[in-house]
Image (cartoon, rainbow, N blue to C red):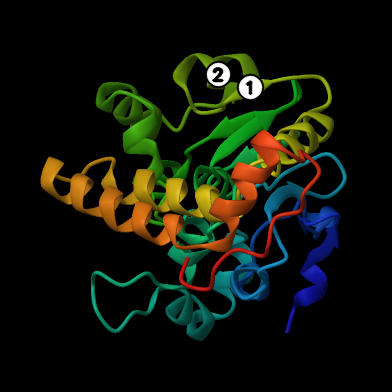
Amino acid sequence: MGMDLVTFEIRQHIAYVCLNRPEKMNALNFDMFVAINSTIKRIAKDSSVKAVILSGAQGNFSSGLDVKSLSKQPSKAVSLLFKWLPGNANLAQRVSIGWQRLPVPVIAVIQGCCFGGGTQIVLGADMRIAEPSAKFSIMEAKWGLLPDMAGLASLRHIMAKDKALQLTYSAQILTADDALKYGLVSEVTEDAMARAEALATQFMQTSPDAIAAIKHSINRSWGASVRQLLSRESLSQIRLLIGKNRVIAAIRQTKNPEKSYQPRQPWW
């Protein structure tokens, strides 16, 4: 259902994911949430994927939640927010935090509008490459709402609390350069897709198991206790040491830099 709202293609081990509702500036209706979530699940099961590039169609990332569409479908609005346990992620939250849970680098390419739910989604990416045309806003307060799509899981680590409060209280619109100053984006460049592809290619020169372990360790240990961090590091390192890609990494460094890595181990 709604898979045409998100296009998906794998080229040279890079999964290209594009929000594809350009007539609505890629605004997020219920079917689009379902399609994004399904795409994340599909990538998680495909060990051939070594990086993800996430973008929006025709010059915009997303104008945010399609409030009009969801207001006409109250049952779907409930489905979007429903969860069995408070600590679980509902559908609205999975389209952001789901990218963090993938064992591969996720790079968001941002052009034009990236408002509300669009900003929440790109906060789930590992890095955000914006073009000068990009504009951002955490604008839920304008609708009398709390930002609740799990973007805070990333936002709290990339900017100071007072800055995050300022942006969420005011719902102000930021230019790409302003977003860079706040730390909301990683880089601003004229050709964000080319830069994202260059980064993805660079990342694929290292072991997919090491990438998965690093992402897993950093995301789960960033705010954890030192004991939890040390435990997670040790367990991950053991898994890497017994894997085939550890041997291949050594061969690439000492004998044959063209030696191909094996698909990542299934436990990541």
Q: From what the image shows, is residue 193 above or below residue 52?
A: above
- Amino acid carrying label 1: it is Glu
Label 2: few (<14), some (14–19) or many (≥20) C-alpha neighbours in 10 Å: some
Residue depicted at 50% across the width and 56% down the height: 96
Where does residue 76 sit, x and y in percent of width and height?
Answer: 53, 81
- Distance between the alpha carbons at the discs numbered 2 and 1: 7 Å
- Amino acid carrying label 2: it is Leu
Do the numbered discs 2 and 1 sit on residues whose CB atoms are within 8 Å? yes
Q: Which residue is mark 1?
A: 187
> Regarding mark 1 in the picture, which secondary structure is present there?
strand
Residue 127 circle label: none
Locate residue 104 relative to residue 139 in the image: left or right: right
Residue depicted at 61% across the width and 73% down the height: 30
Residue depicted at 73% across the width and 38% down the height: 255
> Regarding mark 2 in the picture, which secondary structure is present there?
helix
Q: From what the image shows, is residue 186 above or below residue 152?
A: above
Residue depicted at 83% across the width and 26% down the height: 191
Q: Which residue is mark 2?
A: 180
